[in-house]
Amino acid sequence: MNHFKKLILLTTLMAQSAWAAVNVNQADAATIAAELKGIGLSKATAIVAYREKNGPFKTKEQLTEVKGIGLKTVEKNRQEIKLK
């Protein structure tokens, strides 16, 4: 693969990751941790546990009910968080 094709492929992959979104009502903990800023595996696992105990999240702000997740984290990830 020549350098131009590699550059196009890399640019495409970077653009896709910049537009990545995660459905917090369906994704596993590893996916949530990989896609959301400031959410590691521990907090992502807590999101999944909360969802399993309380049902799907109805609003993005409801994520703040998960221990360790504040409104700043929700705001930082607002565009990436999907509920449906």
Image (cartoon, rainbow, N blue to C red):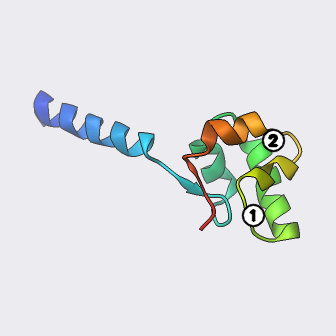
Q: Amino acid at mark 2?
A: Ile
How would you rate the neighbour count of disc 2 (Cα within 10 Å): few for under 14, some for 14-19, many for 20 or more? some
Q: Which residue is mark 2?
A: 69
How would you rate the neighbour count of disc 1 (Cα within 10 Å): few for under 14, some for 14-19, many for 20 or more? some
Asked if residue 39 can be seen in this view, the reply is no
84 relative to 63 in the view: left or right:
left
* Residue 10 numbered tag: none
Q: Classify residue 75 by image quadrant.
A: top right
Viewer-closest of 78 and 66: 78
Q: Which residue is mark 1?
A: 57
Q: Secondary structure at mark 2?
A: loop
Q: Position of residue 18 (x, y in %)?
A: 43, 39
Q: Classify residue 7 by image quadrant.
A: top left
For the N terminus, the quadrant is top left
Q: Amino acid at mark 1?
A: Phe
Q: Is residue 77 above or below residue 2?
A: below
| Residue at screen point 70% across, 42% down | 74
Q: Position of residue 23 (x, y in %)?
A: 60, 60
49 relative to 28 in the view: left or right:
right
Pointer 1 with pointer 2, Cβ within 8 A: no
1 relative to 82 in the view: left or right:
left
Q: Position of residue 5 (x, y in %)?
A: 14, 37
Image mark count: 2
* Alpha carbon distance from label 1 to label 2: 14 Å
| Residue at screen point 47% across, 48% down | 20
Q: Secondary structure at mark 1?
A: loop
| Residue at screen point 73% across, 43% down | 41
